Image: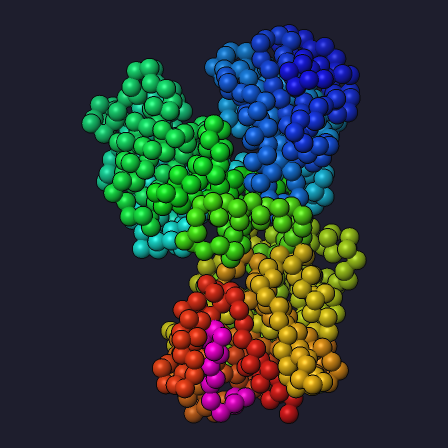
Amino acid sequence: MSPGAQFTSTGTEAAPKHLSVPIKMLSPVSAYDVVEGCCVWCWRDNESTAEGWIVIDSPVPTPAGGGLFLHANATLEEVRDVARSMSSKLAVSSQPQVVGAKGGIRLPPGDPRAPLVLERFIRDNAGVLSACWGTGGDLNTDHAVIDEHARAYCSPGTSTALDALYRALGYTGQHFEDIPALLEGSIDISNGWTLSDYCVGHVMAVTLKELLTRADPNMMGRARLVLQGFGCVGATFALAAQQLDIGRVVAISSQYGYFVDGDGIDCVAVERERRAAAVNKASPGLDPRSLEAGLTPAELSSARYTPRRANSSDEEHLADFLAAAEGEAFIPCAGRYVLTPKAIASLINHTFAKVPVSSRFIVAGANNVFHPAETEENTLSTLDSASVRMLPEWVSNSGTSNLFMRACSGLALKGHGASSLEACANDTKSFINAVFSKVAVSSTNVDLWDACHDLVVTRRAAGAVNRLGVKSMSHLTLTTPDVARAAETIESVYNAKFNEDKTLYQLPGVDDPTLSIVKASDETDPGDIGLSVCFSVYNLARARAVLEAEGVPFRELVSRDGSSELVLRPEETGYPISLSQAPARDSLNNNFSSSGKALKSVAGSAHQLDHYAAIMPDATKMKSFHEHMMGFTHLRTFTVSAGSGTDGQDDGLMHVMALPFDAKRVLILTEGLTQDAVFTKLMEKHGSAYVHHIALEVEDVDALFAEVRERGWRTTADAPSTDLATGLWQFFLKEEEAGCILELIGRGVKDEVVAGADAEAVNDAAGAGGYAGGQGGFRTDNIVELARSLNS
């Protein structure tokens, strides 16, 4: 059957004129064509002139996700184009193995027949939805309405139009019927928007913040934002940009005109007025969804508002708007293919004309904004010629798809809206961080987009990572024979805060884990002494199911309050690890007090937990577990010589891993490569794989070292030592001081330290922040020296 041929869904009963009685689907997936590597279902309505298409970006039907839109000029080419973009967008999510899909119906949205046409489209294509296509609302369609039709026409037991994805992703959550409540739920900061609506604008704002932070951090809080469109996407972006203190909205366009105010537009007030007008029907003659419905009569009659020029095309209207607006960031939120050569010329010659070249950004909320008549490379080259930075729109507007993939896989829970929103933002930030680990901020857009496309291929091939749904390192438990000394050290040297009865400590950095100190009895196994690490997960039930399916042994501890913790064996993970349910919202930790015992040199100058290191028998196996099951990112692997190797051969292996959704902290997985290697002996001495040390970053290592020694704490060396590869200046407290090794590090070194050394190398490393922007190379000398000293 050709793409343009009439489509009839076989096995579906004829429908009454107004579809008053639901007609259940009786057949599996209908016949399809393969067009340019995509599955294509073509449809033609029998009761109107409407046509429609479903495209899955795969040559065979496979689980896929993407919305269903409706507009007057829809084409198969557009549907296929967006389906392919959806594949890229889903690679940003927690489920990169899911391919993209899209549905499109050609019919004017104002046609009174549109609701019934939409229903018939879903009825006739119910087999595709039941088997493989997870879909929802898009342009001129509503998610709740689509769900209603899916329940009526898809296979028995269908709860939403996303059921095919739930089943494919092995959903383990609360109940299927909780998913709509999850998506339609709200959170405190969303100003009445549902979570699924607010997520797209929030992640767009996070994307802009990531770009600003890298390219022009001084612009944070001052950026002028120019919005094309003020529907759900534009309005939620404006709200999120305000909450993230990115800058102010100075111009907004709609299909009827545009409003420009260099002092800033109160977008919250505009949205409030628009909603009130819709309820009270107070704006007769105005589209209730338009920008104009939220403007006051005085604003509409002021010089700040310009009506659309009569008979102007969409391209001309956008060019007029960009000629009238000036700002650092253009945010296209309405319509595909809007960045035509004429619109880009107006953007460069007017909107960005007086903006410094380091501060020009495009963050797209709409899909497929580049005009198809121009190649992607030509459009990007034009933007490069004017120093305009832009990530692909399938990165910047990935928020909603991130949420849907988490909901469908059980990585988002009803009632955990704030946590789910943060997770969706972290999905996109993680992708952006990975891209900028490959290319410099100063790279061209062509190189930047190539890196994005390459990462999509890599992620698609690797499939889902972080299968356990790890959110963060949430808690450390320190088991030690001397609780009093450990507590004194943690309070005084690590500047930890504590709760009222000192059963819980809070390490000083933002997002640092809490810590508890437990007494080791005479019967405590030596392998249980030291540190264990608890990671919070987005859905403990799913993590349990994954561990069971993969045959990873664990034991479950249930506390007095009924909460559970899954304790994994060090032989399986590389060191003591447990998993707990992440809370619905993060605590503000207001119940912790500062210690008067903190050393003067550390009080107020302790930054954050920087890294931790573990020694284990098979570091490469544990690297794979951390990558695929826990979402760690591999940064670097190297070998070292600690002296036991024949003819100076290396006898130690180290993998440096970035923690999930964390651009600051790393884990070093360490293995002795010979029986005589010092790392092997240390592990044998401890009795099992274990956490060797944790490291806290402080402001002044020299002052702290002097005060530590003066106050009687023992160190592994008589002076701090420098790391010429990273610029880290560091020393270690002996294990007896806390029950585990504690490291103190600083970024950068004093001039006298590098006298006679390669000062330029040190300065270069220090300027990179030690780990190349938070995570990067890791020096081996001090680790080897420390290990040797402990084994002596």
Above or below, comparing residue 754 to residue 55 in the picture = below
Is 175 situated left or right of 712 in this image? right
The reply to whether residue 199 is visible in this rendering is: no
User: Residue 3: which quarter of the image?
Assistant: top right
Q: Residue at x 50, y 23 (%)?
A: 140
- Percent across and percent down for residue 79 are 58, 26
Q: Residue at x 67, y 50 (%)?
A: 462
- Percent across and percent down for residue 4 are 64, 15
Q: How many marks?
A: 0
**150 or 595: nearer the viewer:** 150
Q: Residue at x 77, y 62 (%)?
A: 553
Instruction: Based on the picture, tell me whether residue 720 belongs to the magenta stretch.
Output: yes
Is 499 situated left or right of 627 in this image? left
**538 or 424: nearer the viewer:** 424
Magenta highlight range: 714-727
**711 or 282: nearer the viewer:** 711
**488 or 340: nearer the viewer:** 340
Above or below, comparing residue 748 to residue 430 in the picture = below
- Percent across and percent down for residue 495 are 45, 76
Q: Residue at x 30, y 27 (%)?
A: 320
